Amino acid sequence: VLAIHTEEARALPGVAGVFTAEDIPGQNKVGHLKKDWDTLIAVGDITHYLGDAICLVAAETPEILEQAKALVRVDYEVLPMVRSPREAMLPDAPLVHRSGNLLAHKHIQRGNPAEAIAKSKHVLTRRFSTPWTEHAFLEPECAVAYPDGDGVMILSTDQGAYDTQHETMGMLGLPAERVKVRNCLVGGGFGGKEDVTVQHHAALIAYLTHRPVKVKLTRAESILIHPKRHPMEMEFSLGCDENGIIQGVAAEVIADTGAYASLGGPVLERACTHAAGPYNYQNFEIDGWAYYTNNPPAGAFRGFGVTQTCFCIETLLNQMADIVGISPWEIRWRNAIRPGQELPNGQIVDDSTGLAETLEAVKPYCDGARYVGLACAMKNAGVGVGIPDTGRVRLVAQGGRLHIFAGASCIGQGLGTVLTQMVCDQTGLSPEQVVYERSNTYFAPDSGTTSGSRQTLFTGEACRRACRELAEALKEKSLTELEGREFYGEYLGKTDPLGADVPNPVSHIAYGYATQVCILDEEGRIQEIVAAHDVGRAVNPLSVEGQIEGGVVMSMGFALTERYPLEDCKPTAKFGTLGLFRANQIPKITPIIVEKPGLNVACGAIGIGEITSIPTAPAIADAYYRYDGRLRTSLPLEGTPYTRK
């Protein structure tokens, strides 16, 4: 950026202010984990992608705002762009960031996979690719901020009020108590609202003008600006013995993390840790790289990297079953992880492990269909890998009712309902006596980001612990007599760091497991998707079924129709041309809830938000292979009745 000309815009009647990087009172850089994302690009700095903000214009009306924006002129020096990870890794590639183009490298190894694969009776090696994906949530990003004493209040629709607070307070140079955030109804997140997009901009304008302000993205701006699902190029090798028992897996993953880090590092890590699949073998190695490019950022997206690598390992298993001469169901039955066994990461799984039960649940559907595809998956609940991960809840008796305060965003997954049910279950109170309060940073304790399928387990367990004290108090006094009393619960899920030097590391507190089946009709259209999910205990079965149905539909689009095309780092799709699966295309979806006791926290409940989307694409791909004999190793699948002409 060579110069920013704002004089004419500032002079326009009705303009409340025009702000550039020079006006930021604190640190310009924000970022969910790594502070590398510019709040505003300053004169002399380099834009990283087309969604970068150069200046902020605030006006009295939308009409005046459009006039003022048109009067702002920016002088640029055009520099070469980095379009892909392959370009980013070249020795003479332009630097997207001064630190270099490599955001993260992950290496995971257990056993000796090279030797195990070399000695295997059967070996398969394939290359795979998965695309960019837009979250396409119903409500674009929006935030309202207004002065609050000598600080600001932010009304936000995000996946973590405390995350928004932490990023904004650094940008404003204010302590936490002067930056308050209240979470409003979130019109869908799916990972796309973990990063700040408009919240910090709204807070900055409100702080500088001392006036209320609303910042809202148009749909086109939203499609450009917020992080997407990482596109990945992957190569997998699988070795099995003559009975189809997995001997070893080796893999490489290259991810495009776009212009900023967002959650690119953890997404790559999860893609790698779960690439081995939910099976019992001990020879596994994977290398993963995430590169910066000048494309829109990539970050969290339902499945968090596992969606991509699951497509690879499950496709290979289906191919291997044919080579061995057994069914895709049988090869999974022989290899499925069971209680007391070791995952490829070394973790010994608990009694709640129900992958085998999900396989049993779908077997009648596999046996009774001609064109049927199958895939399994596992997904962690919680951050894990040694990172502190805490759920917190405060229960307050007030006005004859019990109020639940938890700093955890409810983004459509029904957290408020789950916590209310847990309170009623543990205390005997009726739902009419319980009030679930919206997440905030000034009275609700920090319960962490709504991500990683963690809130039901972590905040749920914190709630259960708070209820123990409350239940004791209710033995002696009524809720009305407890007026003003607070009951606090906290749960820290302790895990081992990635690569910990222990024989059987605890990578995650819990895993959910799933088997999904895709059945095609004679015309090659999807007749039915059967999705069996092990959830520990289903706190709200109807909500669980809704999660399964929504997750399946989301990944049907991922598998068959969705594209987020980029041309020289510029997205070319509109909302209507992304290829989102339409209501009249949705087939019969049969959710099967598998409940299995064994987890001793959160009443036995394991989160289900992400795993519902993970095995869908490989199951659909396998169904089409059974239909026409064509192996497809990239998404969206080509040559199906759903392929856009």
Image: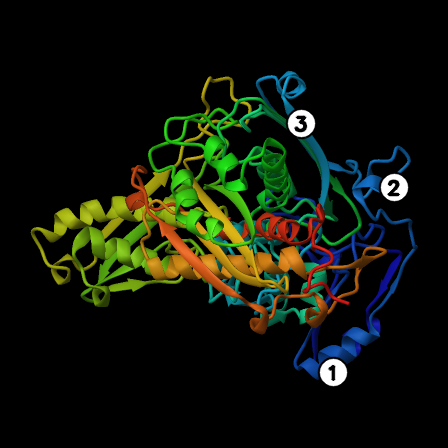
**Identity of the amino acid at label 3?**
Val
Q: Which residue is mark 3?
A: 123
Q: Nearer the viewer, mark 3 or mark 1?
A: 3
Q: Nearer the viewer, mark 2 or mark 1?
A: 2
- Which of the two labelled residues, at mark 3 and mark 2, occupies the earlier sequence position? 2
Q: Secondary structure at mark 3?
A: strand
Q: Secondary structure at mark 2?
A: loop
Q: Is residue 602 above or below residue 215?
A: above
Name the spot of residue 134 as percent of width and height, x first. 66, 59
Circles 3 and 1: CB atoms closer than 8 Å: no
Name the spot of residue 605 as percent of width and height, x first. 34, 46
Q: Which residue is mark 2?
A: 94
User: Which of the 4 image quadrants contains residue 309?
Assistant: top right
- Which of the two labelled residues, at mark 3 and mark 1, occupies the earlier sequence position? 1
**Identity of the amino acid at label 1?**
Pro
Q: How is the image coloured?
A: rainbow
Circles 2 and 1: CB atoms closer than 8 Å: no
